[in-house]
Image: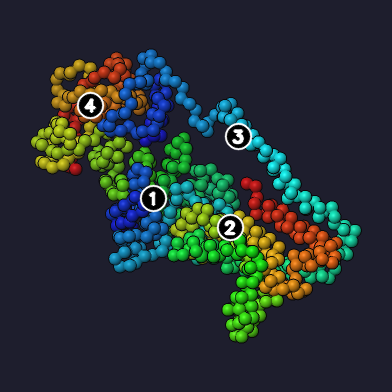
């Protein structure tokens, strides 16, 4: 299973220019903020929007190639799509919805119905076969949409925000269910989301899309240890800085230095990441080992689990994770100055 | 992130809820928050709880003020009630008069009179035929107008809709000049195909189509524009070609518009008078439709005119009621 796509197109203010290579089966999650071009990319892969330039191949079959003038229409691409709000045909029953693709691809009526029932059984909804889509719950509709997309045995499955229509309470369970169904799918699966938890739990590979460009790709572990964009760092709640390497320190864009324990890459552009729990706050200038100390002001406090995240402004804006007890004893809410201390060993530096 | 944070907050220290608006931003790495001061948050220590945030608009029943305001909105501007009453009276009084003055006693005899039945039959044939022609040619036209951004689309739409506002008699004259025996197209039809349209049933049908089709086109075009095209995308990803998608997805989804447009079109065809009498004449049995028969009967046999009118009223009512239950089910 392999998907190779170079997609270039413009739509409104979006300028999409993406290279995507998937060489294995499994789930690739396309993560990005709103209007990053995720849905447009999905529609381009499905053939619903023509490419301005680029090439899409799936298992050696060229689906689209603008230089060669090749373009396979959507209905002849071996691609299944689960749309954002599922788009179950409202005038058909659940069974007719699932059988639709098989009928369209020439399967006989009886066989299509039998196969559709089988698909519904697989997603646990055979008892809803004769229901109309509007009688389904959100979770059921999602499973029907999945069954409908899988019924035609696509080689590539595209899912656009499959869980966004769910309320938060039902999401975790639906996510597990979806994860199970996707794991059983033999082909490649591309899932769009803007939810980092969904991305981390569903994806074997993550591709981060921002403003029409891939800014980072890798496994969830790679992304979470070495974020390469503000967006990813924000999602993970990490402090990310960008600067130039200079021996054992990094000169940040503002001119301030961050000192790291490990040798930093010889020279050039680097990222430095500091986990919030490694940031200490003091009311008086701390003595001792911390190599990075600067002054700041606590602007805001957030509760995350049983910790408090302090948003500190100053020379170097940073988020520090402290205990509720520390907030109380240091009176961090009074808006007075604090000293931020970060040990050099906690600063991780990698090439940009 | 939001959901995680929200959960985190719920699991939190039991302190007062976060400030209003705190749910909007993710924890911004290294970015400072804009709001200074007013850190009404957390921690076991006693901090005055923040003011209770206003409930979201969908959660609680509308507060009394809103309800009062809405009731205020429903108070009609001064004079609307009598004016509306005049409108209702004006629109219904003629129908009432028709019922009051109807020669109920002689009705069965009038209804079965040969002329009446012939006119009724002809009217049904012509109006249904006009509806069929309008559907056959009008639906593809509506689809193209709605979907294909070709040059001069607005001009085409304006031309197509012109018969709707054109006085029907003018339409009839124009039809004669186009399809009459010496018309610019009619002479070819006559000499090459041997088809004569004026003063034939087919001619009457075409005259009705000319006047009625725009109603179908405009309604169906609006329906096609309003439908969610992504259903067609979904059908395409499932392997359905254009025709299959149109037949099995688009048509059912625009069924309400199709029914409304069809009803309008058919009703307009049924009542057509001016273009028909101008183009097709008034020949009993072949071009004398109900409206023509009514008009003629009014000159010498008013009772028959009333009877014929009653028949058309009944048909119209039946269609209206039938469409209501069949095409516009209350969901």
Earlier residue among tags 3 and 2: 3
Of marks 3 and 2, the one in the foreground: 3
Q: Are marks 1 and 4 in contact (CB under 8 Å)?
A: no
Question: What chain does badge 1 belong to?
Answer: A
Judge by depth and name the residue closer to the eye, B276 or A128: B276
Q: Quadrant of residue B18?
A: top left
Q: In what element is the residue under mark 1?
A: helix
Q: Are marks 1 and 3 in contact (CB under 8 Å)?
A: no
Judge by depth and name the residue closer to the eye, B85 or A232: B85
Q: How much space separates mark 2 and mark 1, taking CA atoms? A: 32 Å
Question: What chain does badge 2 belong to?
Answer: B
Same chain? Circles 3 and 2 = yes
Q: How much space separates mark 4 and mark 3, taking CA atoms? A: 52 Å
Same chain? Circles 4 and 3 = no
The residue identified by callout 2 is B219
The residue identified by callout 3 is B73
The residue identified by callout 1 is A39
Q: In what element is the residue under mark 4?
A: strand
Of marks 1 and 3, the one in the foreground: 3
Same chain? Circles 1 and 3 = no
């Amino acid at each position: 299973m392999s998907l190779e796509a170079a997609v270039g197109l413009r739509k409104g203010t979006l300028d999409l220019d993406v290279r995507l290579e998937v060489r294995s089966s499994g789930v690739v999650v396309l993560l990005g903020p709103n209007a990053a071009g995720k849905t447009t990319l999905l529609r381009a892969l499905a053939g619903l929007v023509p490419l301005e330039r680029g090439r899409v191949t799936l298992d050696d079959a060229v689906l689209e190639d603008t230089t060669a003038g090749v373009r396979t229409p959507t209905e002849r691409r071996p691609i299944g799509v689960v749309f954002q709000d599922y788009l179950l045909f409202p005038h058909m029953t659940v069974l007719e919805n699932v059988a639709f693709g098989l009928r369209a691809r020439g399967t006989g009526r009886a066989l299509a119905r039998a196969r559709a029932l089988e698909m519904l059984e697989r997603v646990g909804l055979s008892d809803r076969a004769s229901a109309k889509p509007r009688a389904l719950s959100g979770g059921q509709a999602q499973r029907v949409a999945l069954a409908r997309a899988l019924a035609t045995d696509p080689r590539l499955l595209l899912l656009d925000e499959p869980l966004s229509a769910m309320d938060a309470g039902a999401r975790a369970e639906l996510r597990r269910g979806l994860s199970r169904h996707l794991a059983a799918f033999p082909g490649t699966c591309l899932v769009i989301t803007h939810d980092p938890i969904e991305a981390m739990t569903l994806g074997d590979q993550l591709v981060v899309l921002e403003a029409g460009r891939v800014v980072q790709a890798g496994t969830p572990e790679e992304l979470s240890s070495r974020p390469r964009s503000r967006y990813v760092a924000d999602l993970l709640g990490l402090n990310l800085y960008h600067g130039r390497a200079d021996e054992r320190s990094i000169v940040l864009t503002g001119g301030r230095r961050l000192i790291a324990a490990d040798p930093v890459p010889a020279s050039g552009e680097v990222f430095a990441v500091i986990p919030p729990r490694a940031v200490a706050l003091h009311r008086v200038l701390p003595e001792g080992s911390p190599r990075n100390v600067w002054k700041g002001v606590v602007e805001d406090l957030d509760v995350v689990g049983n910790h408090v995240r302090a948003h500190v402004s100053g020379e170097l804006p940073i988020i520090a994770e402290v205990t509720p007890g520390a907030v109380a004893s240091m009176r961090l809410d009074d808006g007075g100055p604090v000293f931020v201390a970060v040990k050099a060993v906690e600063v991780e530096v990698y090439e940009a | 992130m939001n959901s995680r944070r929200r959960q985190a907050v719920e699991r939190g220290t039991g302190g007062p809820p976060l400030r209003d608006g705190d749910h909007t931003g993710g924890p911004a790495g290294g970015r400072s928050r804009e709001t200074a001061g007013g850190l009404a948050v957390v921690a076991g220590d006693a901090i005055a709880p923040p003011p209770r945030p206003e409930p979201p608009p969908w959660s609680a029943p509308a507060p009394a003020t809103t309800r009062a305001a809405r009731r205020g909105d429903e108070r009609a501007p001064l004079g609307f009630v009598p004016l509306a009453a005049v409108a209702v009276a004006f629109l219904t009084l003629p129908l009432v008069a028709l019922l009051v003055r109807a020669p109920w006693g002689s009705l069965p005899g009038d209804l079965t009179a040969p002329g009446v039945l012939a006119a009724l039959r002809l009217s049904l044939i012509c109006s249904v035929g006009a509806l069929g022609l309008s559907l056959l040619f009008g639906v593809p036209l509506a689809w193209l107008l709605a979907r294909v951004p070709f040059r001069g689309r607005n001009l085409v739409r304006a031309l197509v809709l012109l018969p709707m506002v054109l006085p029907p008699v003018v339409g009839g004259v124009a039809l004669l000049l186009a399809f009459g025996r010496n018309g610019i197209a009619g002479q070819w039809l006559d000499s090459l195909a041997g088809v004569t349209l004026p003063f034939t049933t087919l001619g009457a049908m075409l005259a009705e189509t000319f006047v009625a089709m725009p109603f179908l086109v405009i309604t169906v075009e609006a329906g096609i524009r309003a439908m969610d095209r992504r259903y067609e995308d979904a059908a395409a990803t499932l392997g359905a070609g254009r025709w299959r998608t149109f037949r099995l997805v688009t048509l059912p989804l625009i069924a309400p518009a199709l029914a409304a447009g069809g009803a309008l079109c058919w009703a307009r065809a049924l009542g057509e008078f001016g273009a028909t009498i101008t183009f097709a004449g008034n020949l009993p049995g072949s071009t004398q439709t109900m409206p023509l028969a009514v008009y003629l009967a009014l000159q010498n046999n008013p009772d028959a005119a009333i009877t014929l009118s009653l028949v058309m009223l009944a048909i119209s009512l039946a269609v209206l009621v039938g469409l209501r239950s069949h095409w516009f089910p209350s969901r």
